[in-house]
Amino acid sequence: MALVGAIIGATMGGWLNDSYGRKKATLISDIIFAVGSVVMAAAPNPYVLILGRLLVGLGVGVASVTAPVYIAEASPSEIRGGLVSTNVLMITGGQFISYLVNLAFTEVPGTWRWMLGVSGVPAIIQFILMLYLPESPRWLFMKDHKSKAISVLSKIYDFSRLEDEIDYLTTQIEEERQKRANIRYMDVFRIKEIRLAFIVGAGLQAFQQFTGINTVMYYSPTIVEMAGFENNQIALLLSLIIAAMNAAGTILGIYLIDHFGRRKLALTSLAGVFASLIMLSLSFIFESSSSSGIYGWLAILGLALYIAFFSPGMGPVPWTVNSEIYPESYRGMCGGMSATVNWISNLIVAQSFLSVTEAVGTGPTFLILACVAVLAFVFVIVLLPETQGLTFEEVENIWKVRARGREKGTESLLEAGDES
């Protein structure tokens, strides 16, 4: 039900962002999440607990759309990728901390109530801190709050660059405002350049889930036990190490995404994911017919390599790309739609993983995920342009060039970005 809530929240998130701004959308998500945490902790029966999970999911869904867009719009283009990836680090780091917190509460009376209720604390802290942060300057320009936008920009850029950024934004936002009056959801599919961008953005979000990351994170204790480590404490400890690696890999991704590029990072990540999934698959296939413990340890190694390759690349890249490939007028809408694709894919994988392993076996299940990784690799090669270091408008022109063909006078920088 948390995932169902996240799907609904992500769907609503685009509209909230465009209508009320990135800051208010974040504050709303914090309130919803905090209320959901209290409902879960105080639940007198399973039905109220499920309602709390739904509310928490709504908050997560809205936040998952808002945070990458807010960070991207408040970031200079040369460090935008690293800053958006920091958001992913907070997610993976939060997962690691949640393992530690839950482990601490296992010996406390009312165990699960404390585990679920304490999740409201970060939302309350973020709500308080968010009150002191500014709104997105691009959104302020779009809503004619130019003086407020300039005040925000003056905190981001030094004086020598500030005037150029203001002139640039003024021109671009005026063009966007003229387009904005006729915006419809169907435009995402009707207008070719927006459709191309959405296919790439939504495709990356889907492949992020269908290559199995949340299967690994949700079920890592179960996978460890499947590998032959049946002691619950050992399984939890190994899962804790996996979560720590996930957070550490994301830190590496923050550096690589603005130095190595989005496209190369995604391809390298997927190649490693494929190899590690093959290792996992073979380990489980041979483990079932062998009494040796070596295959159990190979499965753990495959799990560790999977996280090591996935977390720096396919972890942050889909969110970074989705925060920068859409025109301003459609950024909230398309970001919400692609995040919804991510959560729906997450739900499908999470609900089907154990059923598929029971039907065909653990080894073949990981082999299926490896095949998906191959499809994702081809998808990135064919469709994803390099957006490293480009402004939002330069990225937008890449899609126009692809949709309409190479027009006379297209800037060489855009051609280079498209060809890469």
Image (spheres, rainbow, N blue to C red):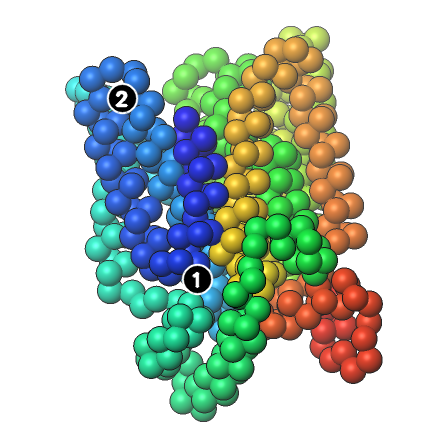
x, y percent for residue 40: 26, 27
Tell me the quadrant of the picture where the N terminus can be found.
Answer: top left
Q: Is residue 412 above or below residue 269?
A: below
Residue pointed to by mark 2 = 48
x, y percent for residue 371: 75, 32
CA distance for labels 1 and 2: 35 Å
> Which of the two residues, 373 or 96, is positioned nearer the viewer here?
373
Amino acid type, label 2 = Val
Tell me the quadrant of the picture where the C terminus can be found.
Answer: bottom right
| Residue density around tag 2, few if under 14, some if 14–19, many if 20 or more, within 10 Å | some
> Which of the two residues, 275 or 324, is positioned nearer the viewer here?
324
Q: Earlier in the sequence, mark 1 or mark 2?
A: 2
Amino acid type, label 1 = Ile
Any part of residue 222 in sight: yes
Please, what secondary structure does the residue beneath circle 1 have? helix
In front: label 1 or label 2: 2
Determine whether, in the image, residue 330 is placed left or right of residue 140.
right
- The disc placed on residue 71 is 1
x, y percent for residue 288: 67, 10
x, y percent for residue 405: 82, 67
| Residue density around tag 1, few if under 14, some if 14–19, many if 20 or more, within 10 Å | many
Say which quarter of the image contains residue 92.
Answer: top left
